[in-house]
Image (cartoon, helix red, strand yellow):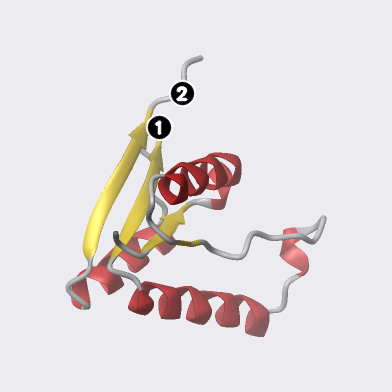
Amino acid sequence: MKIITICGSFKFVKEMKEIAEKVELSGNPVLTPIYPTRPDKDSYTEDEILMFNSMHREKIKLSDAILVVNIDNYIGSSTEGEIEFAQSLNKEVIYYMDVKEG
């Protein structure tokens, strides 16, 4: 059993939620990002965004590994930063890759 933090682009929130469910049902506790709930995600203040990012890094610290959701070979700069952060802590980095059709 490993504690795993899900990392990936908010472009793929639906997929990230589905993958988190699969990982947890396989017997591994999962920590997920906080997904935007406001209709206009740009309405978050800079301080709120910094807090979300800080809390996500705390989740990475608590984890044994991160699972990077890589859909259509897309990894954004924020996710790249999370990968680098996890590697700096000697955390295992697991990639979930998927290619969408169409």
> What residue sits 58% from the left and 75% below the top?
52
- 27 horizontally vs 44: left or right: left
Q: Position of residue 80 (x, y in %)?
A: 33, 60
Residue annotated with mark 1: 72
- 33 horizontally vs 82: left or right: right
Residue annotated with mark 2: 100
In the image as oriented, which residue stretches furthest toward the top?
102
> What residue sits 51% from the left and 14% below the top?
102
> What residue sits 20% from the left and 76% below the top?
88
Residue type, mark 2 in image: Lys
> What residue sits 43% from the left and 63% below the top?
78
- Asked where in the image residue 43 lies, by quadrant, the reply is bottom right
Residue type, mark 1 in image: Asp
* Dot 1 and dot 2 residues touching (CB under 8 Å): yes
- Mark 1 falls on what kind of element? loop
Q: Earlier in the sequence, mark 1 or mark 2?
A: 1
Q: How many marks?
A: 2
- Quarter placement of the N terminus: bottom left
In the image as oriented, which residue stretches furthest toward the left?
90
Relative to 102, is 2 above or below? below
**Crowd around label 1: few <14 · some 14–19 · many ≥20 (10 Å):** few
Q: Position of residue 59 (x, y in %)?
A: 43, 74
Q: Position of residue 20 (x, y in %)?
A: 48, 49
- Asked where in the image residue 47 lies, by quadrant, the reply is bottom right
Give the Cα distance between marks 1 and 2: 6 Å
- Asked where in the image residue 90 lies, by quadrant, the reply is bottom left
In the image as oriented, which residue stretches furthest toward the right?
39
Q: 94 or 78, which lies in front?
A: 94
- Mark 2 falls on what kind of element? loop
